[in-house]
Image (cartoon, rainbow, N blue to C red):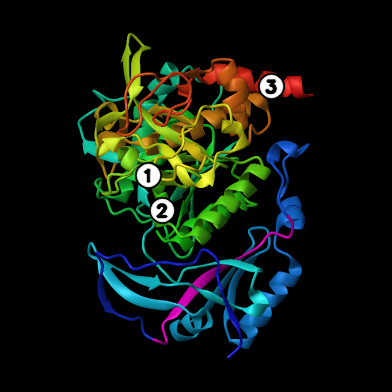
Amino acid sequence: MPSRVALRGSYRQHSPKAIKIGRPAINERLEVTLVLRRKQDAPHPWDLDMYLSHDELTALHGADPQDIDAVERFCFERHFSIVHLDAGARTVVVSGSFGDVTSAFGADVELHRLDARTYRSRRGHLYVPEELAGRVIAVLGLDTRPPARSSKQFQPREGSTGSYTPRQLAGLYNFPANATGNQQTIALIELGGGYRSGDLQHYWKQLGLKNVKISAVSVNGAVNKATGDPSGADSEVALDIEVAGGIAPGAKLAVYFAPNTDQGFLNAINAAIHDRVRKPSIISISWGGPEDRWTRQALDVFNQAFHDAALMGITVFCAAGDAGSSDGEADDKPHVDFPASSPWVVACGGTTLIAEGGKIARETSWNNDTRSATGGGISTFFPAPAYQAQAGIPRSTVRPNFAGRGVPDVAASADPQVGYFVIVGGTAGVAGGTSASAPLWAGLTALINEELGYRAGFLNPLLYGTVMQHKALNDIATGTNGAYSTKQGWDACTGLGSPNGQAILDAIRKAHEESK
């Protein structure tokens, strides 16, 4: 047998709560995604004179043609089919029988059942042949456990009383009044559910808006499939669309539907980043899971994808989670949510906002109880990025000798008790969670991009630099999320604070003019 090498970061264990029900049929067809290394190391976006085009990213930092050739030979020798190859995203989707694929990668895979869901689960390392060692840095798709959950909470309620519409929040947060997000495309990543055009048309009419332009994009066979159940994933999809579209009605919304697996999630993110037709300038992600539940290989390649987005001037917003500092884990330790913990995204926390007379009367860290509170904390995987060097990020209590990336970066209204007016499955209600904060910030960025006439792009250094210096954020200094408390400046509940939209635009414009 040819020599094989263990794939770094691929080790997994079965869930102790799951029940083994057998193994997949040996002839069952499956697809896996091979992720290849970069041709050369990627720079910091701020070291570039201009953001990269798709072609430039592929030529400079895509997959090496020799690595692609090696993968093609590997597939030919094992009679695998190449379903899709993207040199820019450095991914090759490969199809083969269950028996052949698991044998090729030394995978120990079983069928498990947990919470009425059946999925493939693997344990141990994956292995690649010597000729692919160092070339292939991740193999995703053998394990189909859902890695992410949506960060939303929904309750039916007649009318919009006791909640805010996106238009009302745009006013409270002083968003640029004359912009609509024209010429911008916001990508929304969805790992389940769907939307109904009738719901959206009714919603836009309620807000006094014309119909927002929306397209559904299928990834790995997943499609816009609304169930009509407001308590399920449909409410996440509706919340994302209605908040982003309500804030930036002139923007186009592209909704990328993918399976809730690490493979589907990555493929959806890459589909948005490398979409040469819709060309999103902003991505909003309301799905995630505790950082330590991901494999190291997945953390690495997702992070590289977000780095690609930053190099292309695509701003990515991720919800920080809705279960407080524990992120829903039961070990009494703090955890942060991924992908919010990636240093290449803007992590969005949540607040409780109370308005009086059309103005913000008070705003605190959202914390109704330990199961309903903004996420946030310190990464135990990603080191603190340079832009957080002066932010006073504390050391993690879980990994005390490690200076980790602090989450979140910013915040916005998220408390579901005074949440967002939404319509889903024909039902009016109130939704909240940090998955409302992320599309709100995405909509604001569409307005900012329109006003600037160019992409604001990778925002994080600006947020911790010029924007903070110009006091263009509402500093939140009251409340907790469990293990962490708010304070002046950055904190692990609300980051740097909630937005003052026009002030953020002015600060970014000034920074750009000064850099000329």
Q: Could you say whether the residue bearing mark 3 is in a helix, strand or loop?
A: helix
Question: What is the span of residues highlighted in magenta in the rendered image?
Answer: 26-40
Q: CA distance from mark 2 to mark 1?
A: 8 Å
Q: In the rendered image, which quarter is residue 424 located in?
A: top left
Please name the residue shown 48% across and 21% down the image.
489
Does 28 lie within the magenta span?
yes
Q: Disc 3 marks which residue?
A: 511
Residue at image point 59% right, 36% down: 184
Q: Is residue 448 left or right of residue 170?
A: right
**Does the rendering let one see residue 212?**
no
Nearer to us of marks 3 and 1 is 1
Residue 304: x and y in percent read: 60, 52
Q: CA distance from mark 3 to mark 1?
A: 35 Å
- Circles 2 and 1: CB distance less than 8 Å? yes
Tell me the residue at 61%/81% (across/down).
75
Among the two numbered marks 2 and 3 on one chain, the one whose residue lies closer to the N terminus: 2
Which quadrant holds the N terminus?
Answer: bottom right
Q: Residue at x 50, y 58 (%)?
A: 296
Q: Nearer the viewer, residue 132 or 32?
A: 132
- Identity, as a three-letter code, of the amino acid under mark 1: His
For the C terminus, which image quadrant? top right
Residue 391, compared with residue 120, is above or below; it is: above
